[in-house]
Amino acid sequence: MSLNFEEIAKQMARSPQVLEATRKKAEDVRDAMELRWPDVNKIPESQREHLRKDSDHTILITESTGTDRPTHVVTVRHPGAVAKQAQTGFASRAVKDVS
């Protein structure tokens, strides 16, 4: 009898504990980004209207369903995010803080 390690890995990846752990890590990254850029959620109301999901946070966490791996995508939906990253590196530094 042999074990199907690929199927075992897929089952483990779909477990609630693993999904919760990846979600928690994504939230840690979002929190670190907000610490490095405290004004990230301050945008004009005209811009806020375009935030369809979770209009309170400009940093959105989405569960990715395109792979077998448990993945959460952290998206910064702020009009000045590219400029802020270029000036201060807030996103890459936040990821380093959490890693």
Image (tube, grey):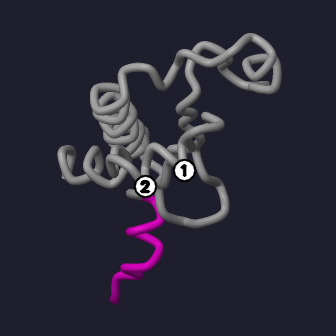
Callout 2, which amino acid? Ala
Q: Residues within 10 Å of mark 2 (few under 14, many from 20)?
A: few
Seen in the picture, residue 72 relative to 17 is either above or below; the reply is below
Q: In the rendered structure, which segment of residues is drawn in magenta? A: 1-11
* Distance from Cα at disc 1 to Cα at disc 2: 6 Å
> Residue shown at 56%/21% (left/top)?
57
Which residue: 38% across, 57% down?
A: 12
Residue 7 is inside the magenta segment: yes
Quadrant in the rendering for residue 19: top left
Above or below, 9 against 26 in this view is below
| Residue 82 image label | 1
Dominant secondary structure of the residues highlighted in magenta in the image: helix
Give the residue number, with chain letter if any, for mark 2: 86
Q: Nearer the viewer, residue 38 or 30?
A: 38
* The N terminus, quarter of image: bottom left
Whole-percent x, y for residue 39 in the image:
44, 20
